[in-house]
Structures are given as structure tokens and as C-alpha cells.
Image (cartoon, grey):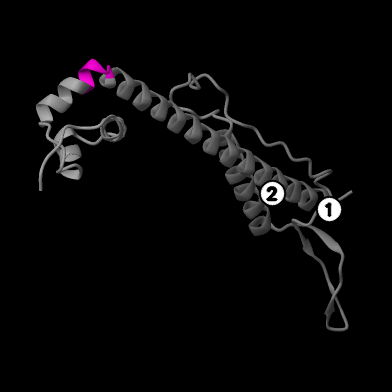
Amino acid sequence: MEKHKATDKELKEMLTLYLKGVKPRNILKRFPEVDITAKDLSTWFSKQKAKANKDKINDKVMENLVNDIIDEETEANRQLLAVTSQIVGVIKEYLDKGQYMDFAGFNYGKMVKTRSNTLNTFAFNQVVKALSEAQKVQRLALGCDDKNKDNENMPAPVINIDFGDSNGD
């Protein structure tokens, strides 16, 4: 095979490969018919200011990648907040209806759907755990617990639940 001097089209293809990160010696493997050395190709790239263009391209790629990651994190956080808001809503409804209280009595072998004045501690503890986990997710999604932020002085969350009169009135 007879080698020939690189044409403008071939040089542009080589430059494109170089800008994509292919090394000059590997570029030459794709163009065995072109009579040029890796050193000559590197020199030509330097004259074309290809290194500066390559750096600009790499910077832009990294910037786009970082922006894509930020967008994905933002969307994931938005979805987490929506889900945890629903969970908190379900918990609120559960508490508003007093469903944490034990059922009382039986009527002809069937459970009577009336609440007693006794707290079902297991059910209530499960509600508190669920609320705590939902709050952790929300704090993380909102960046409240970011270790890079100064959160040491932030007070611990307080959950106030009104159970009404403890005497059952």
C-alpha cells in the first residue's frame, strides 16, 4: 500500500478524533495510508490550537455532566418530598381518626367498631417510627442534614400530638 500526504478531509477527521480524546498514535492506526508521524500530527494539532479546544470541550462536558447530576438529584428529591408528604398525610389522618387506640368489646362473636380509651402502644410506636423516617427523608432531600452546612446548633425536631384528655373524656 502506497502512503499519501494527508488531505484536508483526513486532517479534519484526525482532529475530530483528537478532540474526542484519541491519542495521535492511535489516530494513525486508523489512517495507515496517510504518510505522517505521530509527532508531526501532534505538531499540526498544536498549530491548530487543538489542545485549547480539547480542554474547552472537556470543561463543557464536565459542566454538562455536573448540571445533569444536579438536575437528577433535584428531581429525585422532589419525588421523595412528594412521597413523604403523602406518608405524613396518611399518618395525620390515622392520628386524627384515633386509629392508634385499641378496639373495645365484642358483640355476638364479632368485634365492635368502637375505640377504647386504651392506647395501642405498638401501633402508636409504629406511627412514630414512620413519621421519624419520613422526616429524615425530607430533611435529607431539603439538605437540612448536609454535613457541609452548620447544623450543629439546629434544635432536634419535636413531635407534638394531642391525644385529648387522658381520662377518656
Residue 25, quarter of the rendered image: top left
Q: Which residue is mark 2?
A: 87
Is 22 left, or right, of 56 in this rendering? left
Q: Is residue 9 magenta?
A: no
Whichever of labels 1 and 2 marks the residue nearer the N terminus, that label is 2
Residue stretch rendered in magenta on the structure: 45-49
Foreground pick, 22 / 60: 22
Residue 103: image x %, image y %? 79, 65
User: Relative to the observer, which residue lies in front, 93 or 109?
Assistant: 93
What residue is disc 1 on? 97
Q: Amino acid at mark 2?
A: Ile
Q: Are marks 1 and 2 in contact (CB under 8 Å)?
A: no
| Residue located 60% across and 49% down the image | 129
Task: Assign a secondary structure to mark 1.
Answer: loop
Looking at the rendered structure, the secondary structure element under dot 2 is helix
Residue 23 point in image, percent of width and height: 19, 34
**Residue at x 70%, y 43% (from the top left corner):** 85
Q: Nearer the viewer, residue 136 or 117?
A: 136
Amino acid identity at mark 1: Lys
